[in-house]
Amino acid sequence: MIQIKNLSVYCKDLCLLKSINLTIEKGQFYCLVGESGGGKSLLSKAILGTLPETMRTHGFIQRESEKLDFILQNPRGSLQSQVTIKRQVYHLLNSYGYPKKDWEGLIYKMLASVQLDHHKNLLDKTPLQLSGGMCQKLALACALFSKPDFLVADEVTSALDQESRQEILDLIYKFYQDNQVTLLCITHDLDVAEKYASHLGIIHQGVLIESGEKRKILAHPQKTYTKELIQSFEEHKSFIKSGKSI
Ligand SMILES: Nc1ncnc2c1ncn2[C@@H]1O[C@H](COP(=O)(O)OP(=O)(O)OP(=O)(O)O)[C@@H](O)[C@H]1O
């Protein structure tokens, strides 16, 4: 469980997050949605404890989760570009203390879990030789080795094509269902929240303007910004539908 009370984040004189109150209960799939620059990544960094040193915080964050892990927008950023996948994964398994005799089996299990087991010689390649979607699947698989009970997925599909995007989201959802983790998913897209989330937060100009059960917020938005977001999402959906039916 994560509990945030009256959290404000400042950079010099600028207040970037304003009096955030948020509770994410164990087992929730919490989607944080908002426009670019709204404060989504800062809030996730505050939760992970990775805010830049130049920022000051006021308020209170309580983390009951013991094992937090994260996957980020740029999957190549969490992998070393010139080192083979095999070396990187062995290093990770070693650091998590898995016995050496299990490594081979664990790797193949991990590749199967993210549907990469059919790719020939993948382990001998470097991230530079793989597509963005493949790197993101590997980054997800690597995060799973740490067996997190709280996973932050920050815009993990924004650099991917439509097909890879869907695959990654489905894999994250499957991981969420199979492992009873708590998930914080950060996205621009209300369609991700509509399809996968149990709970939803809307952040706008550094203020968490709505937070709660997804179906309640989508059915009865309270704030103008949320209403506009839902309206443009519905219009986009009708447009796609009408395009498909032509
Ligand atoms: N290291 C930093 N130093 C100063 N200001 C920052 C820093 N990182 C972010 N900000 C500012 O904080 C605000 C929120 O940024 P944040 O990255 O959280 O937005 P976001 O909602 O995640 O946007 P996006 O969807 O584009 O990633 C922005 O105004 C941004 O310019």
Image: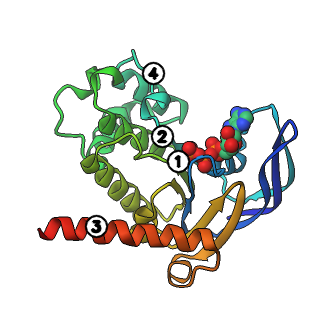
Amino acid type of the residue tagged 2 in the rendering: Gln
> The residue tagged with tag 1: helix, strand or loop?
strand
Answer yes or no: disc 2 within 8 Å of ligand 1: yes
Answer yes or no: disc 3 within 8 Å of ligand 1: no
- Determine the CA span between mark 4 and mark 2: 15 Å
Answer yes or no: disc 1 within 8 Å of ligand 1: yes
Amino acid type of the residue tagged 1 in the rendering: Asp
The circle on residue 80 is 4
Q: Are marks 2 and 1 in contact (CB under 8 Å)?
A: yes
The 10 Å Cα crowd at callout 2, few under 14, some 14 to 19, many 20 or more, is some
The structure residue drawn at horizontal position 44% and vertical position 62%, both measured from the top left corner, is 176
Q: Are marks 3 and 2 in contact (CB under 8 Å)?
A: no
- Determine the CA span between mark 4 and mark 1: 19 Å
Q: Quadrant of the N terminus?
A: bottom right
Q: Which residue is mark 2?
A: 73
Q: Nearer the viewer, mark 4 or mark 1?
A: 1
Q: Is 163 on the left or on the right of 155, as rendered?
A: left
The circle on residue 239 is 3
Q: Quadrant of the C terminus?
A: bottom left
- Determine the CA span between mark 2 and mark 1: 6 Å
239 or 100, which lies in front?
Answer: 239
**Reading the chain from its start, which is encountered first: label 4 or label 1?**
4
Q: Which residue is mark 1?
A: 154
**Reading the chain from its start, which is encountered first: label 3 or label 2?**
2
Farthest residue, direction top:
82
**Residue 41 appears anywhere in the view:** no
